Amino acid sequence: MTTEPLPRAADPAHLTDVLRRAGTLGEGRVREATVESSRPTFLSRIVRLRLTYDNGAAGAPGSLILKTALPGSGVGPESGRSEVEFYTKVATAITRPAVPRCFDADFDAETKAWHLLLEDLADTHFIATKWPLPPTMSQCERIVCTMARFHGAWWDDARLGVSVGTLTDETAAKQYVQSCADQFKRFADFLGDRLSRERRDLYERFLAAAPRLLARHLSHRNLTVVHGDAHIWNCFLAKDGEDDRFFDWDAWRVSMATSDLAYMMATHWYPERRRRAERPLLDRYHAELVAQGVRGYDRAALDADYRLSALWQLMTPVWQASIDLPPVIWWSHLERITLAVDDLGGRDLLG
C-alpha cells in the first residue's frame, strides 16, 4: 500500500456525504480513506481509495476510484471539464449501465480543479488484454455490443446539440478543416522524408475533399454520443453477472457511431486481424443496434459510415502528435490507418 497526501475530494466527511446522497451509505460514516494505489495516465491521475467505516456501512463500497487532474500533463483542464460534463449530463440518462457508476463529479470553473469519484470495478471486471495485444473474437463481440448499447441509448436523441454536446455547423466545419490542414502541415514538416510522397498525396487529397466529406456530419441524422477514444483497453469486461463498461470518457462528443468502431479496428489493428474480424464485428454491432431500437439505419448505411469514418481516422496520428503524445502511440496508427483506407476503398471517396 502506498501513502501520499489525499486531495480534498477524498476527505472522509466529503465521502460520507457523497455516499449518503447516492443511497449506498446509511447512518454510518467514512472513518478513513487511504491510498491503495496511484498511477498517472497521459491526461489524469487514477487513485484507488480504500475506505473504512464507523457503524451502519452495510452495502457501502469498500473502495472507490478517484480521478483527478495530472499536474504538468500539458493538456489543460478541458479533458476534466468534458468528463465531468459526461458523468453529470450523459451517463445519468442511461438506463442500463454501460459506464462506471459515478458518485461525485465536480469541475471548478475558477481554479480548473476537477475530480470524479467512480465505482471501483477492479474486483468484478477486467481489461481483456495487455496493450497492444488484441482480444479474442468473443471478447471483441462483447465490446462492440456494449458500444452499440451505449450508442443506441443516445441515437438521434432530441437533446443532442441542445443540452448535450454540440452539432457541427457550417462555421465549425470550416474551422475544423482549417485546423486539420494546419496540424498536417506541422506533422509533415516534422516527419520530413519519413512520410512518403504517396502518403503526403493521400493526405492532401483528403484535406481537399474534407469540406465535402463533412456533409454527412452536417446532415445531423443518425448521430449519437461517441466515446472518442474507444480502443479495447478502455473497456472493462465483467467477470460474472455484470454489464461490461467503457471508461475514460474525456473525449466524448456527438458524431457518427462508426467513428468509435473505426478507431477501435481500423486505427488499432493490423491488416490481417482487421480483415478477419471487421465484417463479422460490424454485423454483430448492427444486430445489437437494432435490438436497442434503432430504426432507419440499415447495414449498408453502417458500411458507408464506417468507410467514411476510417478515412477521417487519417487525422488521428496527426492530432496525437500535435499534443505531444509519444510516437510509440501514433507512429503505428499512421501505418495501420493508411493501409485500412486502401483496403476499404477510402480513396474512392476523394474524387
Image (tube, rainbow, N blue to C red):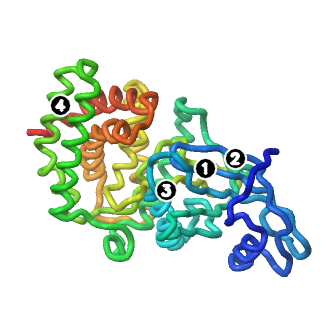
Q: Badges 4 and 2: C-beta atoms under 8 Å apart?
A: no
Quarter of the rendering occupied by the C terminus: top left
Number of the front mark, 3 or 1: 1
Which numbered disc, 3 or 1, marks the residue that appears first in the sequence? 1
State how far apart marks 4 and 2 are (Cα): 43 Å
Q: Badges 2 and 3: C-beta atoms under 8 Å apart?
A: no
Q: Is residue 150 left or right of residue 316?
A: right
Residue visible at 12% across and 39% down? 350
Residue 350 tag number: none
Q: Badges 2 and 1: C-beta atoms under 8 Å apart?
A: yes
Residue 202 tag number: 4
What residue does disc 3 label? Answer: 249
State how far apart marks 3 and 1 are (Cα): 14 Å
Residue type at tag 3: Trp
Residue type at tag 4: Leu
Q: Badges 3 and 1: C-beta atoms under 8 Å apart?
A: no
Residue type at tag 2: Ser
Give the image location of residue 252, x and y in percent. 42, 58
What residue does disc 2 label? Answer: 38
Which numbered disc, 2 or 3, marks the residue that appears first in the sequence? 2
Which numbered disc, 2 or 1, marks the residue that appears first in the sequence? 2
- Closer to the camera in the image, 205 or 237: 205
- Dot 4: few (<14), some (14–19), or many (≥20) neighbours within 10 Å? some
- Closer to the camera in the image, 317 or 148: 317
Number of the front mark, 2 or 3: 2
Residue farthest to the left, as pictured: 351
State how far apart marks 1 and 4 are (Cα): 38 Å
